[in-house]
Image: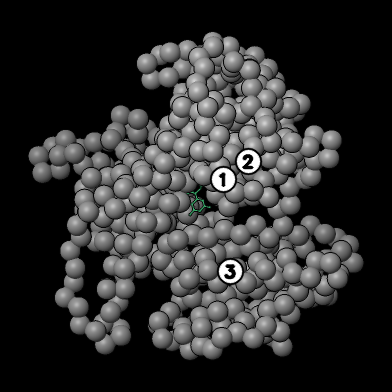
Amino acid sequence: MFRATIKNINAARAPSNCSKLQKFDLIVIGSGSGLDVVNAIYQHGLKVAVIEKDRMGGTCLNRGCIPSKLLIHSADVAEIINRSHLFGLKVNGFSVDFPALLERVNRIVDSESNELRKALEGRENPKLFVKKCKFVGEKTISMVDDENHNETIIGDKILIASGTRPRIPEINGLKETSYITSDEALRLRTQPKVLTIIGGGYIASEFAHFFGALGTKINIIQRGSVLIPEEDEEISKKFTEIFSKKYNVYLDYKIESVSNDNDGDNANKVIVKAKNSSGKLVELGSDQLLVAAGRVPNSDILDLERTGVKINKRGFIIVDRYLETNVKGIFAFGDVIGRYLFKHNANHEAQYAYYNLLHPKSMIHVNYFAMPHAIFSSPQVAGVGFKEQELVKEQQKNNNPKNILEYQKFVYPYIKTGMGQAIDDRDGFVKFLVRKTDRKILGCHILGSQASTLIHEVLVAMKANTKNGKAGTIDNITRTIHIHPALSEVVARAAASNI
Ligand SMILES: Cc1cc2nc3c(=O)[nH]c(=O)nc-3n(C[C@H](O)[C@H](O)[C@H](O)COP(=O)(O)OP(=O)(O)OC[C@H]3O[C@@H](n4cnc5c(N)ncnc54)[C@H](O)[C@@H]3O)c2cc1C
């Protein structure tokens, strides 16, 4: 529906005006995907304000997807060097120039964020406020900047796109310890020799790959019995098995305490004590401790009770299928509503928020069908749709045999394809879950090289033919000629594996 362009914004620069209580047609809180809506909506002649307390561009640009993937590319290159002997090459190791590696990342990220800010600064519409804000009335927002200057504005409509921040679990001693979160891990000045990671989700797995491939010794402490537990069970199990060979993975461990060890040789080391369900205690010393234990919504800092906007038990803002909260005219989207915490989802929802804000009488509901995700670790993981454990659960709770969702599973390993052999991917596989009655793709899960790219043809197949009643069947893939021996042959072979 739209794309944010700096060019469009520059075209509408206007002199500034400093009245104290300004009124806007729309106030957007957050400059992540919120900025997409700002840039699209002011072009309809509406007076728009955007409030951002931090760097422009939100989590993805400054503390998330972009810096992490720039860093991970260095890790991927390191891994290729480490595996080069498999391909008949003798490479005598490598050394890491950590400051140079980080400088590259920060330069790219900071310059993009600065561009976004420059494009808005000094403009009257959209008007940028670099301040921390909270509600003081139903549609009245008070803001304060670093120098404690206060300002209050009123919006006819409000869009909350305030995202999330790292969750810090209640752990004995943690608050007094020099731990880092993903925010700081992306800007470290020195490479840790040993890194302990609390958590076993996708952020933990991506950082383990980044630091681990560069030579840092990694300890991972995970409460559950597998890493990346949100994935299809077969994927989580295989991933856990691969990670356990590379890193010290402690599964089913609960942290007892965290402390700084300031003694002699161990100066500045962090000590983590953890116990498993059978009472076995481990004590891990490391020079950095990364807390990657999930995300919490930035709803608590907004004083939402002043507006009456409702949140759920976990603090995520409750919206209807049009992204409107229980208060008419206040919308919310992206991470802060907690449906899918991915940038592509925030961008997707931004398009609906934009449309629905402009067309209150003919709003359209968000279509989340075939929402994919990926983990950029090693191995990569990507998935869409149902996981097998969800289908099994569905079957178990359904007593009526007529309603049972019968599915078939098609699996194919990378190593049985030409390109899989060329790159020596011995672990990778593609798994399809397909409805027996009509061959509709229910889910697809990939573990292995380029999984984040390979999943895309499955997404297109799932969305294809939606008009002729044969929506999203696996035959969309089997009928397509695939280039031999491109890696995508593994997807085609998996799709055709039961024909
Ligand atoms: C390490 C990491 C890696 C990630 N990698 C990926 C990936 O590879 N792919 C992917 O799809 N997703 C990834 N994500 C998730 C992705 O970054 C988020 O889903 C996305 O940024 C959410 O966008 P948003 O607009 O909802 O919120 P955000 O981008 O978080 O924007 C919210 C903005 O609101 C501002 N704000 C909050 N409260 C206030 C206030 N009171 N006053 C003023 N401003 C306020 C914040 O400063 C922030 O800039 C990653 C996240 C992390 C942490």
Specify the quadrant that holds the C terminus. bottom right
Residue bearing mark 2: 40
Answer with mark 1 or mark 3, whichever residue precedes in sequence: 1
Residue 215 in sight here: yes
Asked if labels 3 and 1 touch by Cβ distance under 8 angstroms, the answer is no
In the image, 25 versus 224, the foreground residue is 25
Q: Could you tell me residue 459's position as x and y percent? A: 65, 66
**Mark 2 element type:** helix
How far from the left and from the top, in percent, is residue 404?
Answer: 83, 66
Mark 3 within 8 Å of ligand 1, using the beta carbon: no
Give the secondary structure at mark 1: loop
Q: Earlier in the sequence, mark 2 or mark 3?
A: 2
Question: What residue is shown at x 51% (from left), y 83% (from top)?
Answer: 486
Task: Give the vertical position of 491 relative to 162 (above or below).
Answer: below
Classify residue 152 as left or right of residue 248. right
Give the amino acid type for the residue marked by disc 1 in the picture. Answer: Ala
The residue that disc 1 covers is: 4
Tag in front: 1 or 3: 1
> Mark 3 = which residue?
455
Q: Residue at x 30, y 56 (%)?
A: 211
Within 8 Å of ligand 1, the CB of disc 2?
Answer: no
Callout count: 3
